[in-house]
Image: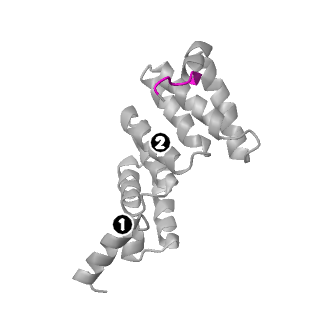
């Protein structure tokens, strides 16, 4: 397989990107199954505490498919373990943007905000989880809603009430 890229391929890639329909994975011909295999390796490295190696894999994955929420969750998890809470919040935010009904990103972002001592933004993340993850969702949704209820106690009702107020500038 040639690694050279000709002018027509560059034009086609630019067209696809401008239309919002391309990832590097697609342009390079990497299949979803191949990406899933790489993800599995990264996930196992994360679970066994090989964070440096897992981080490289998760960063490769988001570089080649920035539209897959679980790859962003992997980057966020590494950042959170390393106490890079601001970075983790950004990664979880992107994952949440890609799949708003998934409660995991909002929950873990709330954990990070709490670690930074920011109860108002933690409450805001929990509020988003409450609002966008319906109670009748999957078992994962119910599990994370229950975990969020516990975090909400740490945040306090005052911060949660503040997060639930409408923004007068919108």
| Crowd rating for badge 1 (residues with CA inside 10 Å; few <14, some 14–19, many 20+) | some
Q: CA distance from mark 1 to mark 2?
A: 23 Å
The disc placed on residue 131 is: none
Percent across and percent down for residue 72 are 45, 50
Q: Is residue 145 magenta?
A: no
Do the CB atoms of the residues marked 1 and 2 lie less than 8 Å apart? no
User: In this picture, is 116 found above or below 7?
Assistant: above
Percent across and percent down for residue 87 are 37, 38
Q: Is residue 127 left or right of residue 9?
A: right
The residue range painted magenta reads: 164-169
Q: Secondary structure at mark 1?
A: helix
The residue singled out by tag 1 in the image is 17
The residue singled out by tag 2 in the image is 92
Q: Nearer the viewer's eye, disc 1 or disc 2?
A: 1
- Outermost residue, top direction? 158
Q: Is residue 123 left or right of residue 87?
A: right
User: In this picture, is 41 found above or below 84?
Assistant: below
**Res 6 quadrant in image:** bottom left
- Name the residue rendered at 41%, 49% in the picture: 50
User: In this picture, is 80 found above or below 10?
Assistant: above
- Report whether residue 6 is seen: no
Q: Is residue 168 magenta?
A: yes
């Amino acid at each position: 397989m040639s690694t050279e890229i000709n002018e027509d391929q560059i034009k086609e890639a630019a067209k696809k990107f401008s239309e919002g329909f391309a990832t590097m994975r697609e342009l390079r011909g990497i299949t979803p199954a191949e990406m899933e295999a790489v993800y599995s390796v990264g996930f196992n490295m994360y679970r066994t505490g090989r964070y440096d190696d897992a981080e490289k894999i998760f960063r490769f994955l988001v570089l080649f498919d920035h539209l897959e929420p679980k790859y962003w969750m992997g980057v966020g998890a590494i950042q959170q373990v390393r106490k890079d809470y601001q970075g983790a919040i950004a990664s979880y935010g992107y994952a949440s943007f890609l799949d708003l009904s998934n409660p995991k990103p909002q929950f873990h972002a709330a954990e990070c905000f709490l670690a930074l001592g920011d109860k108002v933004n933690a409450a805001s993340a929990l509020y988003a989880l409450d609002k966008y993850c319906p109670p009748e969702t999957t078992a994962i949704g119910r599990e994370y809603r229950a975990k969020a209820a516990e975090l909400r106690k740490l945040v306090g009702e005052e911060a949660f009430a503040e997060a639930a107020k409408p923004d007068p500038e919108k």
